[in-house]
Amino acid sequence: MSTFQAPKGTYDLIPPDSAVYLAVREAIAAPLRNSGYGYIETPGFENVELFARGVGESTDIVTKEMYAFETKGGDRLALRPEGTASVLRAALEANLHKTGNLPVKLWYSGSYYRYERPQKGRYRHFSQVGAEAIGAEDPALDAELIILADQAYRSLGLRNFRILLNSLGDKECRPVYREALQSFLRGLDLDEETLRRAEINPLRVLDDKRGDVQKQLTDAPLLRDYLCDACKAYHEEVRELITAAGVAFEDDAKLVRGLDYYTRTTFEFVHDGLGSQSAVGGGGRYDGLSEMIGGPALPSVGWALGVDRTVLALEAEGVELRLPASTSVFAVPLGEEARRVLFTKVTELRKLGVAADFSYGGKGLKGAMKNANRSGARYTIVAGERDLAEGVVQLKDMQSGEQTAVGVNEIVAELESRLG
Protein backbone atom coordinates (compact mmCIF):
# COMPACT_ATOMS: atom_id res chain seq x y z
CA MET A 1 0.00 0.00 0.00
CA SER A 2 1.40 3.40 -1.00
CA THR A 3 2.05 6.01 1.67
CA PHE A 4 0.28 8.59 -0.48
CA GLN A 5 -3.24 8.87 -1.87
CA ALA A 6 -4.90 11.23 -4.33
CA PRO A 7 -5.94 14.49 -2.62
CA LYS A 8 -9.49 14.64 -1.28
CA GLY A 9 -12.04 15.46 -3.96
CA THR A 10 -9.79 14.36 -6.84
CA TYR A 11 -9.48 11.14 -8.79
CA ASP A 12 -7.03 9.20 -10.92
CA LEU A 13 -8.01 8.13 -14.42
CA ILE A 14 -6.69 4.62 -14.97
CA PRO A 15 -7.35 1.91 -17.56
CA PRO A 16 -9.84 0.64 -18.55
CA ASP A 17 -12.07 3.52 -17.29
CA SER A 18 -9.75 6.14 -18.77
CA ALA A 19 -10.64 4.89 -22.26
CA VAL A 20 -14.24 5.99 -21.67
CA TYR A 21 -13.12 9.50 -20.69
CA LEU A 22 -10.96 9.74 -23.80
CA ALA A 23 -13.88 8.61 -25.96
CA VAL A 24 -16.17 11.22 -24.39
CA ARG A 25 -13.64 13.99 -24.98
CA GLU A 26 -13.24 12.91 -28.59
CA ALA A 27 -17.01 12.77 -29.16
CA ILE A 28 -17.50 16.29 -27.79
CA ALA A 29 -14.57 17.67 -29.79
CA ALA A 30 -15.47 15.99 -33.11
CA PRO A 31 -18.38 18.27 -34.14
CA LEU A 32 -16.35 21.32 -33.12
CA ARG A 33 -13.43 20.36 -35.36
CA ASN A 34 -15.92 19.87 -38.19
CA SER A 35 -17.31 23.38 -37.67
CA GLY A 36 -14.20 25.54 -37.91
CA TYR A 37 -13.06 25.48 -34.26
CA GLY A 38 -9.30 25.30 -33.72
CA TYR A 39 -7.67 23.78 -30.63
CA ILE A 40 -6.26 26.03 -27.90
CA GLU A 41 -4.47 25.09 -24.68
CA THR A 42 -3.82 27.54 -21.84
CA PRO A 43 -1.75 27.28 -18.62
CA GLY A 44 -3.24 25.51 -15.63
CA PHE A 45 -2.87 28.69 -13.59
CA GLU A 46 -3.45 32.37 -14.29
CA ASN A 47 -3.27 35.74 -12.57
CA VAL A 48 -5.89 35.85 -9.78
CA GLU A 49 -7.19 39.16 -11.09
CA LEU A 50 -8.18 37.60 -14.42
CA PHE A 51 -10.83 35.50 -12.66
CA ALA A 52 -11.76 38.19 -10.14
CA ARG A 53 -12.61 40.57 -12.97
CA GLY A 54 -14.07 38.07 -15.41
CA VAL A 55 -15.85 35.47 -13.32
CA GLY A 56 -16.95 38.05 -10.73
CA GLU A 57 -15.73 39.04 -7.29
CA SER A 58 -19.11 38.21 -5.73
CA THR A 59 -19.23 34.65 -7.09
CA ASP A 60 -18.62 31.64 -4.87
CA ILE A 61 -15.92 30.58 -7.32
CA VAL A 62 -13.79 33.63 -6.55
CA THR A 63 -14.70 34.15 -2.87
CA LYS A 64 -14.71 30.52 -1.69
CA GLU A 65 -13.64 27.98 -4.29
CA MET A 66 -10.55 29.27 -6.08
CA TYR A 67 -7.16 27.75 -5.32
CA ALA A 68 -5.07 30.92 -5.03
CA PHE A 69 -1.42 31.18 -4.03
CA GLU A 70 1.53 33.56 -4.06
CA THR A 71 4.73 32.67 -5.89
CA LYS A 72 8.25 33.23 -4.56
CA GLY A 73 8.38 36.27 -6.79
CA GLY A 74 5.25 37.72 -5.21
CA ASP A 75 2.82 37.03 -8.07
CA ARG A 76 -0.75 36.17 -7.08
CA LEU A 77 -1.86 33.19 -9.15
CA ALA A 78 -4.81 30.80 -9.13
CA LEU A 79 -5.44 27.35 -10.53
CA ARG A 80 -7.97 27.91 -13.28
CA PRO A 81 -11.55 27.34 -12.02
CA GLU A 82 -13.06 27.66 -15.51
CA GLY A 83 -11.89 28.00 -19.11
CA THR A 84 -13.52 31.01 -20.78
CA ALA A 85 -11.52 33.79 -19.13
CA SER A 86 -8.24 31.98 -19.87
CA VAL A 87 -9.11 31.34 -23.50
CA LEU A 88 -10.20 34.94 -24.08
CA ARG A 89 -7.03 36.20 -22.38
CA ALA A 90 -4.91 34.02 -24.66
CA ALA A 91 -6.79 35.11 -27.78
CA LEU A 92 -6.33 38.78 -26.87
CA GLU A 93 -2.65 38.32 -26.02
CA ALA A 94 -2.03 36.64 -29.39
CA ASN A 95 -4.10 39.31 -31.21
CA LEU A 96 -6.24 36.62 -32.84
CA HIS A 97 -9.06 39.14 -33.08
CA LYS A 98 -6.92 41.35 -35.37
CA THR A 99 -6.48 38.79 -38.13
CA GLY A 100 -9.67 40.00 -39.80
CA ASN A 101 -11.36 36.61 -39.55
CA LEU A 102 -14.05 36.99 -36.91
CA PRO A 103 -15.38 35.17 -35.08
CA VAL A 104 -12.29 33.45 -33.71
CA LYS A 105 -13.56 29.92 -33.07
CA LEU A 106 -11.64 27.89 -30.48
CA TRP A 107 -12.10 24.67 -28.54
CA TYR A 108 -10.17 23.32 -25.58
CA SER A 109 -9.95 20.41 -23.19
CA GLY A 110 -8.39 20.27 -19.76
CA SER A 111 -8.59 20.06 -15.99
CA TYR A 112 -10.09 22.74 -13.74
CA TYR A 113 -9.99 23.23 -10.00
CA ARG A 114 -12.46 24.41 -7.37
CA TYR A 115 -12.40 23.96 -3.61
CA GLU A 116 -15.86 22.45 -3.04
CA ARG A 117 -17.39 19.85 -0.75
CA PRO A 118 -16.71 16.63 -2.64
CA GLN A 119 -19.68 14.50 -3.69
CA LYS A 120 -20.63 12.34 -6.64
CA GLY A 121 -20.51 14.52 -9.71
CA ARG A 122 -18.72 17.38 -7.95
CA TYR A 123 -14.96 17.20 -7.60
CA ARG A 124 -12.17 19.59 -6.69
CA HIS A 125 -10.40 18.58 -9.87
CA PHE A 126 -12.62 18.01 -12.90
CA SER A 127 -12.39 17.74 -16.66
CA GLN A 128 -14.17 19.83 -19.29
CA VAL A 129 -14.27 20.30 -23.04
CA GLY A 130 -15.19 23.84 -24.04
CA ALA A 131 -15.80 25.98 -27.09
CA GLU A 132 -15.69 29.76 -27.62
CA ALA A 133 -16.70 31.89 -30.61
CA ILE A 134 -15.06 35.28 -30.08
CA GLY A 135 -15.79 38.58 -31.80
CA ALA A 136 -19.25 38.34 -33.37
CA GLU A 137 -22.76 39.15 -32.20
CA ASP A 138 -24.94 36.76 -34.16
CA PRO A 139 -27.86 34.56 -33.00
CA ALA A 140 -26.66 31.90 -35.44
CA LEU A 141 -23.46 31.48 -33.40
CA ASP A 142 -25.43 30.95 -30.19
CA ALA A 143 -27.63 28.43 -31.97
CA GLU A 144 -24.61 26.72 -33.58
CA LEU A 145 -22.97 26.02 -30.25
CA ILE A 146 -26.14 24.65 -28.69
CA ILE A 147 -26.71 22.42 -31.72
CA LEU A 148 -23.11 21.15 -31.68
CA ALA A 149 -23.35 20.22 -27.99
CA ASP A 150 -26.63 18.40 -28.66
CA GLN A 151 -24.95 16.59 -31.55
CA ALA A 152 -22.03 15.55 -29.35
CA TYR A 153 -24.27 14.14 -26.61
CA ARG A 154 -26.42 12.24 -29.07
CA SER A 155 -23.37 10.78 -30.83
CA LEU A 156 -22.46 9.24 -27.48
CA GLY A 157 -25.90 7.66 -27.21
CA LEU A 158 -27.27 10.00 -24.53
CA ARG A 159 -31.00 10.65 -24.78
CA ASN A 160 -32.30 11.70 -21.35
CA PHE A 161 -30.78 15.16 -21.19
CA ARG A 162 -32.63 18.46 -21.43
CA ILE A 163 -31.57 21.84 -22.76
CA LEU A 164 -32.71 24.82 -20.68
CA LEU A 165 -32.70 28.21 -22.40
CA ASN A 166 -33.08 31.81 -21.23
CA SER A 167 -31.96 35.37 -21.99
CA LEU A 168 -30.23 37.55 -19.42
CA GLY A 169 -30.66 40.77 -21.38
CA ASP A 170 -27.89 43.29 -22.00
CA LYS A 171 -26.51 46.55 -20.63
CA GLU A 172 -29.62 48.37 -21.87
CA CYS A 173 -32.35 46.36 -20.17
CA ARG A 174 -30.66 44.42 -17.38
CA PRO A 175 -30.09 47.47 -15.11
CA VAL A 176 -33.86 48.05 -14.97
CA TYR A 177 -34.45 44.43 -14.06
CA ARG A 178 -31.58 44.49 -11.57
CA GLU A 179 -33.23 47.35 -9.70
CA ALA A 180 -36.60 45.57 -9.65
CA LEU A 181 -35.03 42.34 -8.43
CA GLN A 182 -33.01 44.06 -5.72
CA SER A 183 -36.13 45.81 -4.48
CA PHE A 184 -37.89 42.43 -4.30
CA LEU A 185 -34.99 40.71 -2.53
CA ARG A 186 -34.71 43.40 0.13
CA GLY A 187 -38.18 42.44 1.31
CA LEU A 188 -37.27 38.78 1.89
CA ASP A 189 -35.99 37.03 5.01
CA LEU A 190 -32.44 36.40 3.80
CA ASP A 191 -29.19 36.01 5.71
CA GLU A 192 -26.65 38.81 5.75
CA GLU A 193 -24.30 37.23 3.19
CA THR A 194 -27.13 36.65 0.71
CA LEU A 195 -28.36 40.22 1.12
CA ARG A 196 -24.81 41.45 0.49
CA ARG A 197 -24.68 39.33 -2.65
CA ALA A 198 -28.01 40.78 -3.75
CA GLU A 199 -26.51 44.28 -3.69
CA ILE A 200 -23.48 43.24 -5.76
CA ASN A 201 -25.14 40.87 -8.25
CA PRO A 202 -28.79 40.02 -7.51
CA LEU A 203 -28.96 37.44 -10.31
CA ARG A 204 -26.62 35.28 -8.23
CA VAL A 205 -29.34 34.97 -5.59
CA LEU A 206 -31.67 33.39 -8.16
CA ASP A 207 -29.03 30.66 -8.58
CA ASP A 208 -29.07 29.86 -4.84
CA LYS A 209 -29.78 26.15 -4.43
CA ARG A 210 -31.02 26.30 -0.81
CA GLY A 211 -34.65 25.27 -0.42
CA ASP A 212 -35.55 28.02 2.06
CA VAL A 213 -34.25 30.65 -0.37
CA GLN A 214 -35.95 29.15 -3.42
CA LYS A 215 -39.32 29.13 -1.64
CA GLN A 216 -39.09 32.89 -1.17
CA LEU A 217 -38.19 33.42 -4.85
CA THR A 218 -41.47 32.03 -6.21
CA ASP A 219 -42.85 35.47 -7.03
CA ALA A 220 -39.54 37.08 -8.00
CA PRO A 221 -39.72 39.33 -11.07
CA LEU A 222 -38.62 37.54 -14.26
CA LEU A 223 -36.00 38.98 -16.58
CA ARG A 224 -37.99 38.05 -19.67
CA ASP A 225 -40.59 40.67 -18.66
CA TYR A 226 -37.89 43.36 -18.74
CA LEU A 227 -36.09 42.51 -21.97
CA CYS A 228 -35.69 45.36 -24.44
CA ASP A 229 -36.97 44.90 -27.99
CA ALA A 230 -33.47 44.15 -29.33
CA CYS A 231 -32.88 41.39 -26.78
CA LYS A 232 -36.35 39.94 -27.37
CA ALA A 233 -35.72 39.79 -31.14
CA TYR A 234 -32.25 38.30 -30.64
CA HIS A 235 -33.53 35.60 -28.30
CA GLU A 236 -36.43 34.74 -30.56
CA GLU A 237 -34.08 34.20 -33.49
CA VAL A 238 -31.90 31.88 -31.38
CA ARG A 239 -35.02 29.89 -30.48
CA GLU A 240 -36.16 29.71 -34.10
CA LEU A 241 -32.77 28.51 -35.36
CA ILE A 242 -32.53 25.79 -32.73
CA THR A 243 -36.06 24.65 -33.44
CA ALA A 244 -35.42 24.56 -37.19
CA ALA A 245 -32.44 22.27 -36.53
CA GLY A 246 -34.73 19.82 -34.74
CA VAL A 247 -33.15 20.39 -31.33
CA ALA A 248 -35.63 20.34 -28.45
CA PHE A 249 -35.23 22.83 -25.59
CA GLU A 250 -37.16 24.18 -22.63
CA ASP A 251 -37.62 27.87 -21.88
CA ASP A 252 -36.55 28.48 -18.29
CA ALA A 253 -37.26 32.05 -17.20
CA LYS A 254 -35.36 31.53 -13.92
CA LEU A 255 -32.19 30.10 -15.46
CA VAL A 256 -29.09 32.12 -14.62
CA ARG A 257 -25.48 31.01 -14.83
CA GLY A 258 -23.14 31.22 -11.86
CA LEU A 259 -20.64 33.55 -13.54
CA ASP A 260 -20.98 37.32 -13.80
CA TYR A 261 -19.92 37.71 -17.41
CA TYR A 262 -23.00 36.24 -19.11
CA THR A 263 -25.36 38.42 -21.21
CA ARG A 264 -28.32 37.60 -23.44
CA THR A 265 -28.39 33.90 -24.40
CA THR A 266 -27.76 31.53 -21.50
CA PHE A 267 -28.30 27.78 -21.52
CA GLU A 268 -27.70 24.66 -19.50
CA PHE A 269 -27.65 20.95 -20.24
CA VAL A 270 -29.15 18.87 -17.43
CA HIS A 271 -29.57 15.15 -16.89
CA ASP A 272 -32.20 14.02 -14.44
CA GLY A 273 -30.38 10.77 -13.69
CA LEU A 274 -27.61 12.52 -11.75
CA GLY A 275 -29.46 13.67 -8.64
CA SER A 276 -28.62 17.10 -7.22
CA GLN A 277 -25.62 17.59 -9.54
CA SER A 278 -27.84 17.45 -12.64
CA ALA A 279 -25.98 19.96 -14.84
CA VAL A 280 -23.68 18.25 -17.33
CA GLY A 281 -22.71 21.46 -19.13
CA GLY A 282 -23.73 24.98 -19.95
CA GLY A 283 -22.77 28.33 -21.33
CA GLY A 284 -23.99 31.45 -23.00
CA ARG A 285 -23.14 34.82 -24.50
CA TYR A 286 -20.62 37.09 -22.75
CA ASP A 287 -20.47 40.28 -24.76
CA GLY A 288 -18.72 42.40 -22.12
CA LEU A 289 -16.02 40.04 -20.84
CA SER A 290 -13.27 41.24 -23.17
CA GLU A 291 -13.64 44.81 -21.90
CA MET A 292 -13.74 43.55 -18.28
CA ILE A 293 -10.25 42.08 -18.68
CA GLY A 294 -8.80 45.05 -20.56
CA GLY A 295 -9.51 44.14 -24.16
CA PRO A 296 -11.62 45.78 -26.88
CA ALA A 297 -15.34 45.18 -27.30
CA LEU A 298 -15.61 41.58 -28.57
CA PRO A 299 -19.09 40.06 -28.29
CA SER A 300 -18.64 36.33 -27.76
CA VAL A 301 -20.43 33.10 -26.87
CA GLY A 302 -19.31 29.71 -25.60
CA TRP A 303 -19.92 26.65 -23.48
CA ALA A 304 -18.17 24.05 -21.36
CA LEU A 305 -19.31 20.45 -21.03
CA GLY A 306 -18.24 18.34 -18.07
CA VAL A 307 -16.48 15.13 -19.05
CA ASP A 308 -16.89 13.63 -15.56
CA ARG A 309 -20.62 14.29 -15.46
CA THR A 310 -21.13 13.12 -19.02
CA VAL A 311 -19.57 9.79 -18.04
CA LEU A 312 -21.96 9.62 -15.05
CA ALA A 313 -24.88 10.41 -17.37
CA LEU A 314 -23.85 7.55 -19.67
CA GLU A 315 -23.75 5.22 -16.66
CA ALA A 316 -27.18 6.45 -15.51
CA GLU A 317 -28.65 5.55 -18.91
CA GLY A 318 -26.76 2.27 -19.11
CA VAL A 319 -24.97 3.36 -22.28
CA GLU A 320 -21.82 1.38 -23.03
CA LEU A 321 -19.55 3.00 -25.57
CA ARG A 322 -18.06 0.95 -28.38
CA LEU A 323 -14.39 1.42 -27.72
CA PRO A 324 -11.66 0.28 -30.11
CA ALA A 325 -9.55 -2.56 -28.75
CA SER A 326 -6.40 -1.24 -27.12
CA THR A 327 -4.53 -4.29 -28.47
CA SER A 328 -5.24 -6.16 -31.71
CA VAL A 329 -2.22 -8.47 -31.75
CA PHE A 330 -0.32 -10.01 -28.83
CA ALA A 331 3.02 -11.73 -29.38
CA VAL A 332 4.15 -14.66 -27.21
CA PRO A 333 7.79 -15.66 -27.72
CA LEU A 334 9.13 -18.93 -26.31
CA GLY A 335 12.91 -18.65 -26.16
CA GLU A 336 15.53 -16.01 -26.93
CA GLU A 337 15.51 -16.30 -30.70
CA ALA A 338 11.70 -16.03 -30.73
CA ARG A 339 11.95 -12.89 -28.56
CA ARG A 340 14.16 -11.19 -31.14
CA VAL A 341 12.06 -12.30 -34.12
CA LEU A 342 8.63 -11.49 -32.65
CA PHE A 343 9.76 -8.18 -31.19
CA THR A 344 10.80 -7.16 -34.71
CA LYS A 345 7.40 -8.22 -36.07
CA VAL A 346 5.55 -6.30 -33.34
CA THR A 347 7.57 -3.21 -34.22
CA GLU A 348 6.66 -3.60 -37.90
CA LEU A 349 2.96 -3.97 -37.04
CA ARG A 350 3.02 -0.84 -34.92
CA LYS A 351 4.60 1.15 -37.76
CA LEU A 352 1.67 0.07 -39.93
CA GLY A 353 -0.79 1.37 -37.33
CA VAL A 354 -1.73 -2.02 -35.86
CA ALA A 355 -2.14 -2.02 -32.08
CA ALA A 356 0.30 -4.70 -30.96
CA ASP A 357 1.75 -5.78 -27.62
CA PHE A 358 4.41 -8.23 -26.46
CA SER A 359 4.87 -10.70 -23.62
CA TYR A 360 7.65 -9.19 -21.54
CA GLY A 361 9.58 -10.74 -18.67
CA GLY A 362 10.27 -14.20 -20.13
CA LYS A 363 6.94 -15.72 -19.03
CA GLY A 364 6.10 -19.32 -19.89
CA LEU A 365 3.35 -20.19 -22.36
CA LYS A 366 0.57 -20.46 -19.76
CA GLY A 367 1.32 -17.10 -18.10
CA ALA A 368 1.86 -15.35 -21.43
CA MET A 369 -1.47 -16.61 -22.82
CA LYS A 370 -3.23 -15.28 -19.73
CA ASN A 371 -1.77 -11.88 -20.53
CA ALA A 372 -2.88 -12.26 -24.13
CA ASN A 373 -6.44 -12.95 -22.99
CA ARG A 374 -6.42 -9.97 -20.62
CA SER A 375 -5.18 -7.68 -23.38
CA GLY A 376 -8.33 -8.23 -25.43
CA ALA A 377 -6.24 -8.93 -28.54
CA ARG A 378 -8.04 -10.48 -31.50
CA TYR A 379 -4.96 -12.46 -32.56
CA THR A 380 -1.99 -13.97 -30.77
CA ILE A 381 1.31 -14.87 -32.41
CA VAL A 382 3.16 -17.72 -30.68
CA ALA A 383 6.61 -18.93 -31.72
CA GLY A 384 9.14 -21.32 -30.26
CA GLU A 385 12.41 -22.85 -31.46
CA ARG A 386 10.69 -25.62 -33.46
CA ASP A 387 8.38 -23.10 -35.19
CA LEU A 388 11.26 -20.87 -36.21
CA ALA A 389 13.27 -23.84 -37.43
CA GLU A 390 10.37 -24.54 -39.80
CA GLY A 391 10.18 -20.84 -40.76
CA VAL A 392 6.68 -20.31 -39.27
CA VAL A 393 4.82 -18.80 -36.32
CA GLN A 394 1.50 -19.95 -34.88
CA LEU A 395 -1.35 -17.48 -35.43
CA LYS A 396 -4.28 -17.96 -33.04
CA ASP A 397 -7.70 -16.35 -33.53
CA MET A 398 -8.70 -15.53 -29.94
CA GLN A 399 -12.42 -15.48 -30.80
CA SER A 400 -12.73 -18.77 -32.65
CA GLY A 401 -9.76 -20.53 -31.06
CA GLU A 402 -8.52 -21.54 -34.51
CA GLN A 403 -4.74 -21.77 -34.82
CA THR A 404 -2.77 -21.85 -38.09
CA ALA A 405 0.88 -21.84 -39.07
CA VAL A 406 1.94 -18.75 -41.04
CA GLY A 407 5.35 -18.06 -42.53
CA VAL A 408 7.56 -15.74 -40.49
CA ASN A 409 7.99 -13.41 -43.44
CA GLU A 410 4.24 -13.43 -44.24
CA ILE A 411 2.82 -12.86 -40.74
CA VAL A 412 2.78 -9.05 -40.88
CA ALA A 413 0.98 -8.96 -44.23
CA GLU A 414 -1.43 -11.69 -43.06
CA LEU A 415 -2.40 -9.77 -39.92
CA GLU A 416 -2.72 -6.50 -41.82
CA SER A 417 -5.08 -8.24 -44.24
CA ARG A 418 -7.18 -9.87 -41.52
CA LEU A 419 -7.51 -6.71 -39.48
CA GLY A 420 -8.46 -4.61 -42.51
Image: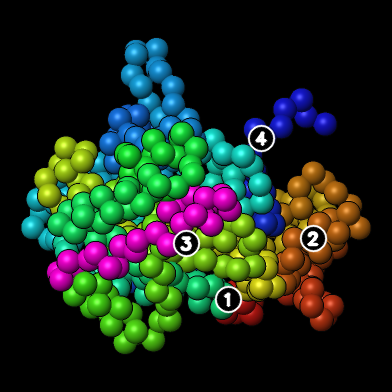
Q: Earlier in the sequence, mark 2 or mark 4?
A: 4
Q: Amino acid at mark 2?
A: Arg
Furthest residue toward front: 187
For residue 370, which quarter of the picture?
bottom right
Label 1 environment density (alpha carbons within 10 Å; few <14, some 14–19, many ≥20): some
Q: Earlier in the sequence, mark 2 or mark 1?
A: 1
- Earlier residue among tags 4 and 3: 4
Q: Residue at x 28, y 54 (%)?
A: 180
Q: Which residue is mark 4?
A: 8
Q: Residue at x 41, y 69 (%)?
A: 252
Q: Which residue is mark 3?
A: 218
Marks 1 and 4, how far apart in space?
Answer: 31 Å
Residue in the image at 45% along x and 72% along y: 163
Q: Amino acid at mark 1?
A: Asn
Residue 24 seen in the figure = no
Q: In the image, what residue type sits under mark 3?
A: Thr
Residue 69, percent from left and from top:
44, 22
User: To which residue does mark 2 refer?
Assistant: 374
Q: Amino acid at mark 4?
A: Lys
Helix, strand or loop for disc 1: loop
Q: Earlier in the sequence, mark 1 or mark 4?
A: 4
The residue that disc 1 covers is 160
Q: Nearer the viewer, mark 1 or mark 4?
A: 1
> How would you rate the neighbour count of disc 4 (Cα within 10 Å): few for under 14, some for 14-19, many for 20 or more?
few
Element assignment for label 4: loop
Evaluate if marks 4 and 3 touch, with contact meaning CB atoms under 8 Å apart. Answer: no
Q: Position of residue 232 (x, y in %)?
A: 21, 72
* Mark 3 element type: loop
Q: Residue at x 32, y 48 (%)?
A: 182
Disc 2 vs disc 4: Cβ atoms closer than 8 Å? no
What span is in magenta? 206-231
